[in-house]
Amino acid sequence: MTNGKTLVSCAAAALVLLPVAPAAAKPVVVTAPTDQLVVRHVSYADLDLATNEGGARLHQRVGSAVSDVCTEANNWDNGSFEFKAGVMKCSTSAWNQAQPQIDRAMQRAREIASSGSSTIAAAAISISVGR
């Protein structure tokens, strides 16, 4: 803590898989022990995740979303060491939680490509971190 400002611990960062559902379905609610969340949703509906190119493009999108959400959650770039440390911690946590979502999405795409169906529900990647 410096100058009375508190850095948010991104250990509470949560990445969840949000199932694609009809409009009447109840949404998945993401909670964190803070009053505010910074959220980014990563769509991959336009990507063929059964290909290396599609997988690489999804990783790029998630990387951009992680960078964006962690920058905002740490009160934007002020050049301080605390900011950089907070973003690094947040990014590590976010990626550790995003990777299983990416893996499931790619597994689903491979199953559909090989058999025409998958038991894995269609989903979007959602990144949520506390401020």
Image (spheres, rainbow, N blue to C red):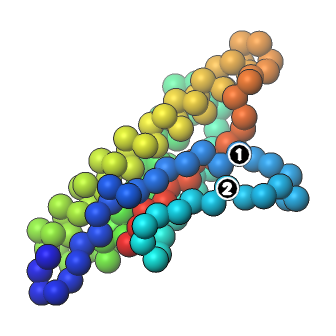
Give the residue furthest to the top.
114
Instruction: Tell me the CA gap for discs 2 and 1.
Output: 8 Å
Q: Are marks 2 and 1 in contact (CB under 8 Å)?
A: yes
Frontmost residue, 37 versus 74: 37
Question: Which residue has dot 1 on it?
Answer: 19
* Disc nearest the viewer among 2 and 1: 2
If the image is split into quadrants, where does the C terminus sit?
bottom left
Up/down of 3 relative to 1, above or below:
below
Q: Which mark is on residue 99?
A: none
Q: Amino acid at mark 2?
A: Val
Up/down of 19 relative to 81, above or below:
above
Residue 46 shows in the view: no
Indicate the secondary structure of the residue bearing disc 1: strand
- The local crowd at label 2, few if under 14, some if 14 to 19, many if 20 or more residues have their Cα within 10 Å, is few
Would residue 130 be found to the left or right of residue 74 on screen? right
Image location (x, y in percent) of residue 40 = 53, 61
